[in-house]
Amino acid sequence: MRWLLWIIGLAAAATALTLLGGLNEGYVLVALPGQRIELSLNLAVILLLLGFISAYALLRLLFTAIDLPARVAALRARRKAEGAQHALLEALRDFFAGRFARAEKGAVRAVELGAAPDVGAVIAAHAAHGLRDRPRRDAHLERLEQGDAAQAPIRAVARARMLIDDQRPEEALAALAMLPVKHTAALRLELRARQRLKQWELAPALIDQLEKRGVFSADQADAERRHAWLQMIRRQAGDSAALAALWKRVPERHRRDAIIAAAAATVFQALGESAQARGIIEAALDAEWDAALVQLYGEQPGDDALRRIEQAERWLKTRREDAALLLTLGRLCAHQQLWGKAQSYLEASIAIEATYTAHLELARLHEGLERGDEARRHYRESLELAAAQLQRASGGRRRRTV
């Protein structure tokens, strides 16, 4: 449709010019020495137009010929850049597909063709790292070190990640220290390095920053913090003063955590700090009831068993059907040789929930009172419950021995 409109337009323009030319009777007189040339005005206009067009075409041809080498060079450079980008893209595809050897070769070729040297070197280094070829990986990293300051973040993060994989966390931290500002990926790497070095006291602050940046959910961050505090508590297992100082630094909400409270109470109890252990467990149970923590409350009571019995009986007023609490009371009473109360509490615990632990405690109590038949019966029931629990945990599978 468009070509038809062009034909109609050109035909109309030609018709109009023909009509105007027929109406024009003027002429042009060209006087030269010894000659006079007379032309119609229409022919003179046509000749002028043709001369202008010819001169314009010749000039364009001349300028094109002069500019041709530069255009050829630009075309070659563009094709080379396109080839470099294609090679870099193929190297990335091979790397993410796990074809590390091809990815390394492709990245090196891309850099030779003119691709970004920092990106190519990082891809090649990671590919060599995936192939466990440390000399080639380090060679690629050395080339990366020769870049300008703008490449510092990519150098630091790449080197730190690989050093952590190589179990060299100190060097990884040194690489990350070169960063003026640590972004999210750098903070994650620093946390991994601190954990490898067991620098647990520095972990909570890093976890807080990563939680704010959305790397960890609230549950994940709490789990990471719990692990860090547990490690710090266990590290102080031989020093009661250092453990007490550390416990004061633990945030209040983590002191109420059942797992952390259990670990701290166990260590304090082992150090002979029975009152401190009791206080930790009581505070945690007041914040949130936990059956495992209740049972720990009755283990190794030390010289404050009576106070623990009093506290446990106060809890029992509102938790009469709690089997773990009744078991704890039975243990504490047995420790104080309150045989009647111990037996009643243990039997009440078994009536609510029969466990091999409760049967074992009751068997020991009867054995201490020289009631052999009762002791053997409860020992047998304890063993049966333990075997059933083990079978459920293993799915009924047996390990064959030869």
Image (spheres, rainbow, N blue to C red):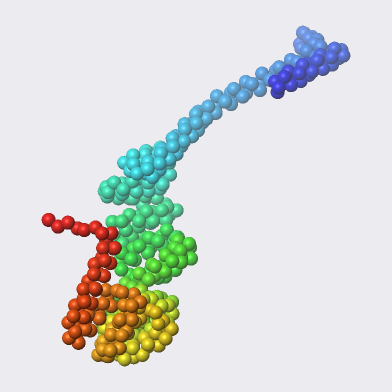
Q: Is residue 48 visible?
A: no
Most foreground residue, 60 or 368: 368
Q: Determine the residue positioned at 32% across, 58% down.
A: 164
Most foreground residue, 206 or 321: 321
Q: Quadrant of residue 3?
A: top right
Q: Is residue 105 above or below residue 278?
A: above
Most foreground residue, 327 or 261: 327
Give the quadrant of the N terminus.
top right
Q: Is residue 61 visible?
A: yes
Q: Quadrant of residue 97?
A: top left
On the rendered structure, is 309 left or right of 398?
Answer: right
On the rendered structure, is 308 left or right of 1?
Answer: left
Q: How many marks?
A: 0
Q: Is residue 130 above or below residue 243?
A: above
On the rendered structure, is 303 left or right of 367?
Answer: right
**Residue 310 location, x and y as percent?**
36, 90
**Residue 231 location, x and y as percent?**
31, 72
Q: Determine the residue positioned at 31% across, 77% down.
A: 350
Most foreground residue, 183 or 274: 274
Give the quadrant of the C terminus.
bottom left
- Of all residues shown, which one is farthest toward the front? 373
Q: Quadrant of residue 247?
A: bottom left
**Residue 86 location, x and y as percent?**
44, 37
**Residue 185 location, x and y as percent?**
42, 58
Q: Determine the residue positioned at 43% across, 40% down.
A: 89
Q: Determine the residue positioned at 38% across, 45% down.
A: 96
- Of all residues shown, which one is farthest toward the left? 402
